Image (cartoon, rainbow, N blue to C red):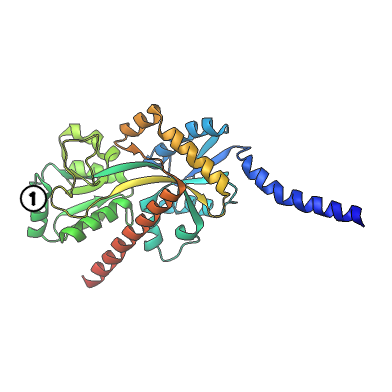
Amino acid sequence: MRKYLLLFLAAAISGSVLPAAHAADWPDRPIRMIVPYPPGGATDVAARLYAQQMGDYLKQTVVVENKAGAGGEVGAEAVARATPDGYTVLMGALGSLAINASLLDKQNYSFVKDFKGVSVAIRMPMALAVNDAVPAKTVQELIALAKSRPGKLTMGSAGNGSSQHMAGELFKQITGTDILHVPYRGSGPAVTDLLGGQIDMVIDTLPALLPQLASGKIRILGVTTDTRAPALPEVKTLAEQGVPGYAVATTYALLAPTGTPAQAIEKMSMAMQQAGASPQLREGAAKLGAKATPTTPAATDKVIAGEIDKWGAVVRRSVTRTAKQ
């Protein structure tokens, strides 16, 4: 009897130790980093900037896998439903995820409940740009022009519910302007029509706008972040130009399914922070007009909560305003 009791105790002890030991050994196989957009976009670039250096730190391959569809929802849902073992993670655009959580009537996952923050990757400023034919040379002149022509000026975006769309809605809400929203299928077509004069303005990411400045067909009137963009140090922020409280950045972050072992999340976060401190990665981010800003898991969760609060409020005000019109 004593022999069987000892065997039982040994099995119980080993059963309690093995999961911890397994988590401590993480990772022991490649990690899939899902990007919920097609290759070549800003989220994809952010993922690839970090993946290799993370792999070097973790001594495992980090494979970037594009799983596009439904404005990022297909890839996000796939990660939310993945086994929470640290081997499937999401590089997501927090603004888009937060907007979708507020805007979509039905989701097969919960952004709030099904994800745990690992680390912010990069913060990318956006900018307000106008077609050169628009007479306004400053943000205040543009606001005055919009108020003199309610509903006549047009603002393009990457699509209904996109970060660019909601950044525009926030601008309209703070300034009290009535500007017609024109949705496109992505930033590329919107910027093309801005260059061609089919629309008056956009609020879009710097990578979408900077290559077009040399054409002389567009002007950047202001950047959306709370501080000036290193890529455009001479361009004032919107807040500096009399749009109080306006502070918008496209923030890309690494997320893991809720239930992922804390040890794995901490190791991934440390790998992100190590990668983000490297000159090579910082230079790569700077080429996008962005800044590498890796964070702890706790700090990442705070950023996520802030994005959910901000864009949820913008969506609610936008829906209310539309219903009244």
Q: Residue furthest right?
A: 1
Q: Relative to 192, does residue 94 appear above or below in the rendering? A: below
Residue topped by disc 1: 141
Quadrant housing residue 43: top left
Which of 43/24 is in front? 24
Residue 52 drawn at (x, y percent): 49, 31
Q: Is residue 188 visible?
A: no
Q: Is residue 226 visible?
A: yes
Q: Residue furthest front?
A: 2
The quadrant of the rendering that contains the N terminus is bottom right
Residue 297 in the figure: left or right of residue 191? right
Residue 41 drawn at (x, y percent): 38, 40
Q: Relative to 77, does residue 233 appear above or below in the rendering? A: above
Which of 66/139 is in front? 139
The quadrant of the rendering that contains the C terminus is bottom left
Which of 47/40 is in front? 47
Quadrant housing residue 180: bottom left
Residue 46 drawn at (x, y percent): 40, 38
Residue 226 in the figure: left or right of residue 64? left
Q: Residue at x 48, y 31 (%)?
A: 53
Q: Residue at x 57, y 45 (%)?
A: 263
Q: Residue furthest bottom?
A: 324
For disc 1, the neighbor class at 10 Å (few under 14, some 14 to 19, many from 20) is few
* Amino acid type shown at disc 1: Glu
Q: Residue at x 20, y 61 (%)?
A: 173
Residue 200 drawn at (x, y percent): 16, 49
